[in-house]
Image (spheres, rainbow, N blue to C red):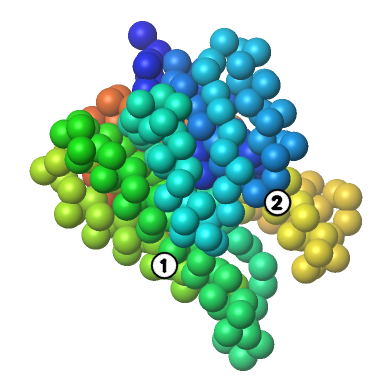
Amino acid sequence: MTLLDNKVVLVSGGSQGVGAAVARAAAREGASVVITGRRSEPGEALVAELEAMGAQAAFVRTDVVDVVQAKSSVAATVSRFGRVDCLVNSAGLTSRGSLLDTTPELFDAHIAVNLRGPFFLMQGTVADMLSRQAPGTIVNIISTSAHCGQPFLTPYSAAKAGLAGLTRNAAHAHRFDRIRINGLNIGWTDTEGEDATQRAFHGADDDWQLQAGKSLPMGRLGQADEIADFVVFLLSERSGVVTGSVIDWDQNVIGALD
């Protein structure tokens, strides 16, 4: 039996990067998958890919900044597949800003994408689980920057720290409902979004991934499919009773000093 056999998995921000990798991994493990994103073309292309694998899949165009759209993506999943068994919050905003140069608009954008959107997606998903008196699992993609982060990631770090706290609070609130909620603080990962960020904000060259890897303990960036396998494990019964855990998925040890 596959890890997510007959489960319905909703992946926010699932049309690229870590979210797309999670969608592929969930489909391989027997799940029906609904992915959301702001752009229809990559979303529909991924749906076609998942269907070619033999999975049932759907795309719901969603901007998580809009709470109505975020909650509607849950309703659309229930309408299509009858329920939501698993939610993965992977939509994210990584634009730069320090304490001194962050505008109110940039701050609000980070809160909207990295905290408020996940909050209301969790709200809708948990409400569906409770209405059916059914167990479920949620995994929030957070960041090691939730511990502190670089000075140019101040609003991002603040929002991701909030998501880590939300993960624990919601897990505690719904532990007796058999709804398990965990998070991953992911480190530096090779994705399309990270490539665009490095080029836009740091003037990165075509070989930036190789150069970045030389500075890391394992000699390379983390890969989205590696994260996806870990997420599927946490979504599945294989991870047992664990809930309220925010796990550092990184090759550097947080808090360690040389």
Is residue 214 at all visible to an observer of this figure? no
Residue bearing the label numbered 1: 161
Q: Position of residue 236 (x, y in %)?
A: 33, 27
Q: Residue furthest bottom?
A: 100
Residue 170 placement: quadrant = bottom left
Is residue 45 at all visible to an observer of this figure? yes
Position of residue 226 in the picture relative to residue 116 (left or right): right
Q: Position of residue 61 (x, y in %)?
A: 61, 43
Residue bearing the label numbered 2: 193
Q: Is residue 238 above or below residue 64?
A: above
Helix, strand or loop under label 2: helix
The disc placed on residue 127 is: none
Q: Is residue 102 above or below residue 122?
A: below
Of callouts 1 and 2, the N-terminal one? 1
Residue 115 placement: quadrant = bottom left
Residue beneath the point at 72% across and 36% down: 42
Q: Is residue 13 above or below residue 42?
A: below
Please tell me which residue lies in front, 91 or 242: 91
Q: Residue furthest right?
A: 206
Position of residue 96 in the picture relative to residue 237 (left or right): right
Mark 2 residue type: Gly
Helix, strand or loop under label 1: helix
Label 1 to label 2: alpha-carbon separation: 20 Å
Q: Position of residue 35 (x, y in %)?
A: 55, 36
Mark 1 residue type: Ala
Q: Residues within 10 Å of mark 1 (few under 14, many from 20)?
A: many
Which quadrant is home to the N terminus? top left
Residue beneath the point at 26% across and 45% down: 127
Q: Residue furthest left?
A: 176
Residue 256 placement: quadrant = bottom left
